[in-house]
Image: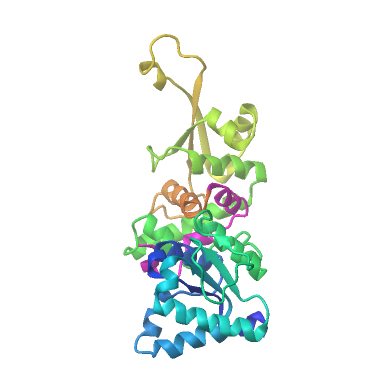
Amino acid sequence: MSSSEYEYDVGLSFAGEQREYVDRVANELSSLGIRVFFDDYERADLWGKDLYVHLDNIYQYRCRYCILFVSKDYARKVWPNAERQSAQARAVKEKQEYILPVRFDNTPVPGLRDTIHYIDGVRTPPCELADLARQKLGMPLQQDYMPPVLDRLFVRLEIADDEEAQRSARKTAWSFLSSLRKMTSNERNVILTVFRCGCPDALPENVHIDIDLMRRETGESVESIKEILGGVSSLGFTCSIRYSTDGDSCVEGVVLGDSYMVDLTWVDRSVDADWYYPEMLVAYEMVQGVTEYYCEQHGIEALERLDFSQLGGTSLEIFS
C-alpha cells in the first residue's frame, strides 16, 4: 500500500504509565501535520466499539508505522500486548519495517528481537522523537506556515472564550508573520532573538534584553545589532537603547563593564489593524508558543523557517 492509502501515518502503542510522555509525542506529531492514532484523540469514535476487534484493525491494517513504547509496564499489561501482537502480525506478513520501538528500559518483549534498533525514550525528548518520525515518513519540514486554527495561541493569550479578541489576535498574528517575511535572515535572527530571550516584564508596551546577551545569542556584533534594529522601522519596529545600572546596588566596589538594555516595540501597520488586542503581547506569545514544546535547537530552527504550526492543535482539550 502507498502511504496515502493508510488512515494514519503513525499508531502509538503504550502503557498508561508512559501516557504523559506519549501525549507530548502525539501533540508534536500532530503539529507536524502527521496523522496519528492516539486513544485520547479518538475518544468519541472508540465509545461503544469492541476494542479488541477495533484496535486489532487499527494496528494491523490502518497505520503506516507503529511506534511501540517498551517498558516493564507495557510488557505486563493485557491491552498493550494485544496491540503488540496485532502490530507484529502485520510486520510478519509484510516482512518490512513497521514496528518502531522506543525503549524506557531493557524489559524483554515477546517477538521483539534485541537486534531491532530502538530509540532511547529516557534520553530522547518528545519533540526530537516526533521529528525522527517525520524523517522516517519522509515528510518535509513546514516552511512559512501559519495553522488555520490558532487555538494554542488563544490559550496562551487567555482568550479561548473571547471570539472578538480571537479575531483581533488572528489578524495581528498574520501581520506579524507578514513583517517577518519581509526581513532578511539576519534581521529575523535579531528580532526573533529579542522575543525569544527578552524579558516580558514591560509587556504589552515592550520587551527588553541586554545587548551583550543579544550579541552572544545572534552571533552579530553590537554595531551590527544596532544597525539592524534601526533598519526595520518601516515594518513597525521601534527600538531604543538605554544604560542599565541595575547591578550597582547589588555589588560592593567597582562594577566592571557597561550594561546596555534594548527596548523593542512593534505595532501592526496593516491597513485593517484594529488594535483590539495588544500587538506586542500577540507577537511575544507567538514566538514563545513556537519554542515552548521544542528543545532550544528545534525551536530556533522552527522560527528560522517561520513555522508557526505549534500555535495550532486538534483541540483545546489537548493542550489544557
Q: Residue at x 58, y 36 (%)?
A: 217
x and y, in percent, of residue 76 in the image: 41, 73
Most foreground residue, 297 or 149 = 297
x and y, in percent, of residue 314 in the image: 45, 70
x and y, in percent, of residue 243 in the image: 47, 21
In the picture provided, is 122 more to the left or to the right than 142? left
In the picture provided, is 173 more to the left or to the right than 319? right
Magenta residues, dominant SS class: helix
Q: Which residues are magenta?
A: 296-320
Most foreground residue, 312 or 241 = 312
Q: Residue at x 42, y 55 (%)?
A: 274
Does the magenta run of residues contain 308? yes
In this picture, is 210 found above or below 253? below
Does the magenta run of residues contain 102? no
Q: Quadrant of the C terminus?
A: bottom left
In this picture, is 305 found above or below 316? above
Kindly indicate the quadrant of the structure image that contains residue 96: bottom right
In this picture, is 137 found above or below 45? above
Q: Is residue 150 something that shows in the picture? A: no
Q: Residue at x 37, y 79 (%)?
A: 43
Q: Residue at x 45, y 10 (%)?
A: 254
Residue at the left extreme?
A: 161
Q: Is residue 5 something that shows in the picture? A: yes
In this picture, is 23 found above or below 51? above
x and y, in percent, of residue 110 in the image: 52, 76
Q: Quadrant of the N terminus?
A: bottom right
Most foreground residue, 134 or 320 = 134
Q: How is the image coloured?
A: rainbow
